[in-house]
Image: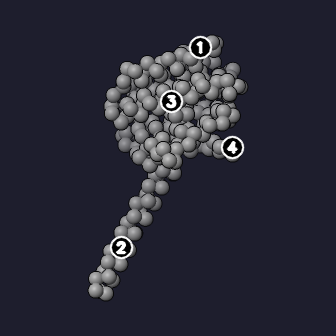
Amino acid sequence: MPVSWTSHRFSGGALALDAANTVVLRGDPDKTFDRFAEPEEIARFAEAASIFRSEELGGRRVEAASPRRIAPVVLAIREATDRLFREAVAEDVIQSAALATLLRTCAEGLGGIPFAATPERPFGDAATPLAFEAALAVSALSLLEPGRLSRLRICPNCGWLFIDRSRNASRQWCDMAVCGNRRKASRHYRRRMAANGDASGVVTRKDR
């Protein structure tokens, strides 16, 4: 069944993080699944990213013309991104081995693709489409900037990586409308159940 690439799927704040988050529930081996399991979804993701990541991409459209061919490179960049930056958030450290893997996979994504970037246009000329694997590499490398690296977070509800762009760097959820509300609803449910349990306990003691 095709994935619905809604705006929520792009809550990471950067193309590379959105791609890393296509593996759902990474920490739960019994429930985890990969939204890129079918390579065709890479092309559909790229199409949606052109819309939802337009600001980051400088208006340049990205495309995955041969998703099955590029899948190994895309998945390698995705996994290297998740490993490096998840560890950076959780342990406040960047391991050289993980960094080397990211640099190598990003080089593969950029290799052989005509590409000229400037500080103002890191993704190049907006007039022509950019290969998805190249865009993914540029986005991943941009996360090494200290200003962005210090703002990386892990959502406590879903485990997604995201950039905290709040003014006081206090954002907790990847998406308040989804994960924030779910966590609030969960807390409310637990409080209600606890209250009901207390009431039941009173009744039980009376019965005794």
Q: Percent from the top left, x then y, of residue 50? A: 64, 32
**Label 2 – label 3 distance at C-alpha:** 44 Å
Q: Is residue 157 left or right of residue 7?
A: left
Mark linked to residue 197: 2
Residue visible at 36% across and 40% down? 168
* Amino acid under disc 3: Glu
Q: Mark 2 near mark 4, Cβ–Cβ under 8 Å?
A: no
**Label 2 – label 4 distance at C-alpha:** 43 Å
The residue at which mark 1 appears reads as 111
Rendered view: 105 above or below 165:
above
Q: Quadrant of residue 48?
A: top right
**Label 3 – label 1 distance at C-alpha:** 18 Å
Disc with the residue nearer the chain's start (4 vs 1): 4
* Amino acid under disc 1: Gly
The residue at the far bottom in this view is: 207
Comparing marks 3 and 1, which lies closer to the viewer? 3
Mark linked to residue 2: 4
The answer to which of 199 and 34 lies nearer the viewer is 34
The residue at which mark 3 appears reads as 79
Q: Percent from the top left, x then y, of residue 87? A: 38, 32
Q: Mark 4 near mark 1, Cβ–Cβ under 8 Å?
A: no
* Amino acid under disc 2: Gly
The answer to which of 121 and 20 lies nearer the viewer is 20
Disc with the residue nearer the chain's start (3 vs 1): 3
Callout 4 secondary element: loop
**Label 4 – label 1 distance at C-alpha:** 30 Å
Disc with the residue nearer the chain's start (2 vs 4): 4
